[in-house]
Amino acid sequence: MHVGTYSESPSDRLWKEYSSVFTSFDDLTLARWMCQTLGQFSGRSWRLSHPLIGAYRLAAQLGHDRQIWFKRMATPPADYLEARDRGCIRRSA
């Protein structure tokens, strides 16, 4: 039985090409770009199809992979509060 080779769709290749811009950013540049862009979103409604939303999504995926929010390299806009980490609360038996 012949197994076909996996081929990326044209849109997958396009998204990969778009994300390559952010892979060239160091962690500090990526963190600052994300904070500044997040500030642009504040108080407005944005279509999910807007190019800036797509670009932010790509940057956020890379930022998540690099865990840049944990490094606290940039200050997020005031409208976006940090979620409190409640973690797993274990009670003694």
Image (cartoon, helix red, strand yellow):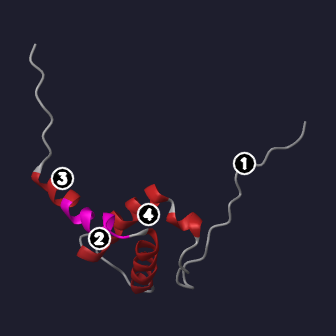
Q: Name the residue under label 3.
A: 12
Q: Is residue 85 left or right of residue 4?
A: right
Q: How many marks?
A: 4
Mark 1, Cα crowd under 10 Å, few <14 / some 14-19 / many 20+, is few
Q: Is residue 5 visible?
A: yes
**What kind of residue is marked 2?**
Ala
**What kind of residue is marked 4?**
Gly
**Which of pointers 3 and 1 lies earlier in the amino acid sequence?**
3
Which circle, 2 or 4, is nearer the viewer? Answer: 4
**What kind of residue is marked 1?**
Cys
The residue that appears at 15% across and 59% down in the rendered structure is: 14
Distance from the alpha carbon under mark 2 to that under mark 1: 33 Å
Which circle, 3 or 1, is nearer the viewer? Answer: 3
For the record, the magenta segment spans 17-25
Q: Residues at badges 2 and 1 in contact (C-beta under 8 Å)? A: no
Q: Where the N terminus falls, by quadrant?
A: top left
Q: Nearer the viewer, residue 76 or 44?
A: 76
**Which of pointers 2 and 4 lies earlier in the amino acid sequence?**
2
**Which of pointers 3 and 4 lies earlier in the amino acid sequence?**
3
Which circle, 3 or 4, is nearer the viewer? Answer: 4
Q: Mark 4 points at which residue?
A: 63
Distance from the alpha carbon under mark 3 to that under mark 4: 19 Å
Mark 4, Cα crowd under 10 Å, few <14 / some 14-19 / many 20+, is some
Q: Mark 1 points at which residue?
A: 88
In the image, which disc is placed on residue 31?
A: none
Q: Where the C terminus falls, by quadrant?
A: top right
In the image, which disc is placed on residue 55?
A: 2
Distance from the alpha carbon under mark 4 to that under mark 1: 24 Å
**Which of pointers 2 and 1 lies earlier in the amino acid sequence?**
2
